[in-house]
Image: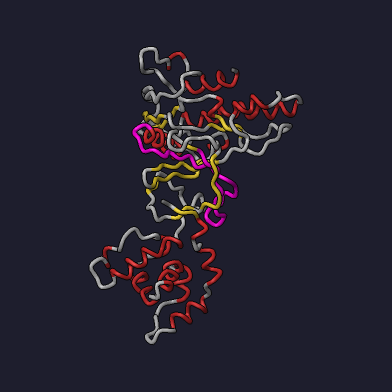
Amino acid sequence: MTRSGNLCLLWHSLTEFWTREKITTLLCSPKDMIKQSADTIFKHYLISFSVLVLNLNAESINLFIQEDLRDTQLPLPSVPEVYSDSASCGVFEEFIKRQWKFCPMLLDCGSSPKPSRRNLLPQRILPIVAKEKLNPEADEDGEQAVLFKVDLHPLCSQLGKPVVFKEYRQRTHETQRLFTNECDLYKQLREDSFGHIVTYCGSFECLGRSTIVLEFAPGGTLLSFFESRQPPRTDEQRKLFWGNLFGLFRGLQCIEDFTADHRHSRHTYRLKGTHQDIRPQNILVCGASSDEDYSAPFKFVDMGTADIRKMRDGGYDRHAIDQRGNGMYSPPEACRDEGVATDIGDKSDTWAGPRGNIE
């Protein structure tokens, strides 16, 4: 399995240890001087160089520089093809064994794209500092998904706060359907959508376990919010509460048309979505709001029953595929009296949202 991040030697730590002077000294140490630039190694090959030094094989940095195998290409999944049948094959086999502690997985770090459904090798280190179940009584072997609150190493994430690992721990047809639907919808959302939809930080799979990394909501669900809070009493509290509640419609708009900001013509496609499981249990209260503070935003979560469909701009809009979300607050056309709902449209979620909140 992937291991926690306290084992890894991060690139930032390497830059604190290595200097150009140290690199130059090491390059000049062998009887046959290693004729490479310390600046080049420091900027582009520092992790590779560190692994090779650990393997007492610093001179093999030549192999990496010759083939432009920079640190951005790490971790290496296998011996590069150009060296697979050469005398240098053993160098890379040993390198691959040692590289993992230098190559932790990064989550939402800088300009890097978010990992989405990334297949991780068991050796890959997850930068986990602390991990605990949100529901201590959750059955890790019996439930489809188990939620964990996770603290990440600050050098591997720019989030600066805890996240949630939603782990599908059993690999079945149903859990794969839910995981795939959820990842597919989150991938389509623009960054400005996450004001009213829980922030997606990435997803990955390893050894039959599928994990989605999401924003942590300290305020719980909207259902628990309604059950534990007194109604807003002051004008300011009412303004904040209703502003957050109606803000959910902006979240629905982001799901309803992922391509709303595109420059459309009759030759372009629109991508449209439906959530299909809107209820107070699937709306989170984000931010650290107190009993007297109603400023924490409400955000949609749990996209496992979502559906995405395409249509020509201005063309015929087909119905969404029934992903069998909870039907408690669904509109009449989404009723399953005959087994399958065939008339789920882009306004079905708009119907479900107010009904669940009013109740």
Farthest bottom residue in view = 31
- Residue, x 52% and y 51% (percent of image)? 128
- Write the start and end of the magenta stretch as one range: 147-174
Of residues 153 and 116, the one nearer the viewer is: 153
Position of 122 relative to 329 (above/below): below
Q: Reply yes or no: does residue 215 show up in magenta.
A: no
Report which quarter residue 184 is drawn in.
top left
Q: Nearer the viewer, residue 280 or 251?
A: 280
Q: How is the image coloured?
A: secondary structure
Left/right placement of residue 227 relative to residue 309 reads: right
Outermost residue, left side: 85
Compared to residue 96, the image places residue 207 above or below, namely above
Depth order, front residue of 333/57: 57
In the rendered image, which quarter is residue 270 located in? top left
126 left or right of 280 in image: left
- Residue 342: % across, % down: 37, 18
Position of residue 152 measured from the top left corner of the image (x, y, whole percent)? 54, 51
